[in-house]
Image (tube, rainbow, N blue to C red):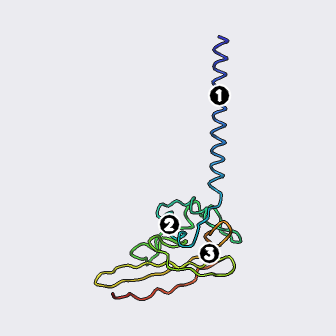
Amino acid sequence: MVRLRLLAAAHLIAGLIAGLVVLSGLEGGAAMAQEPAYFSDPKSAVAEAAKLLRAEAWAELARYYDLSGTTVPPDTLTSGSFFVRDKPPAVGHPAGFDRYKQPFAPGFSYMTHTSAGDDEVKVTVDIEIDQGGGMIQRGMDTFYLRRSVHGYQLLPNSPDRPADPVPTPPAIVK
């Protein structure tokens, strides 16, 4: 009887220790998921951000944002509400590009980038849509990155930092 109690106590203690190891691993994983991430260059930022947008990997995409000096609540990034609209606008784009608020709609590709101050880079992305009959519609958008010794991070377009309006050129006939 005493031996059974000791054995049960040993199993209980082993289970508690295993639970503590698992919990500490989860805490470390959660902390790791919140560490900032950086792109190596503006072109790879476009490709990687588009991949994360398509996958709706909001928490991962949030790690690539520098929110310092903004009033953007971090939980809006991890929830996805920062990136996509919950309701379509009254007049929407047929391809659904207007579903995405930040940083750009997936499907856009890297076009160019220019320096926008000591530590900021303005990135221009574009897309070509074949409308049939030789008509190609081209759209462009911009967003900003902050450059640091670690790499590049996205900056939000928000009331604190509005996006530059980029005119969409008329349809091109090829």
**SS label for mark 1:** helix
| Quadrant of res 171 | bottom left
Q: Is 45 on the left-hand or right-hand side of 72?
A: left
Disc on the earlier residue, 1 or 2: 1
Which residue corresponds to mark 1?
14
Compared to residue 136, the image places residue 66 above or below, namely above
Q: Viewer-nearest of labels 2 and 3? A: 3
Q: Residues within 10 Å of mark 1 (few under 14, many from 20)?
A: few
Q: What residue is drawn where x is 47% and y is 74%?
A: 109
Q: Residues within 10 Å of mark 3 (few under 14, many from 20)?
A: some
Mark 1 belongs to which amino acid? Ala
Which residue is identified by label 2?
86
Q: Nearer the viewer, residue 88 or 53?
A: 53
Circle 3 residue: 158
| Residue 32 image point, x, y percent | 64, 53
**Rendered residue at 62%/39% (across/down):** 22
Q: Quadrant of the C terminus?
A: bottom left
- Disc 2 vs disc 3: Cβ atoms closer than 8 Å? no
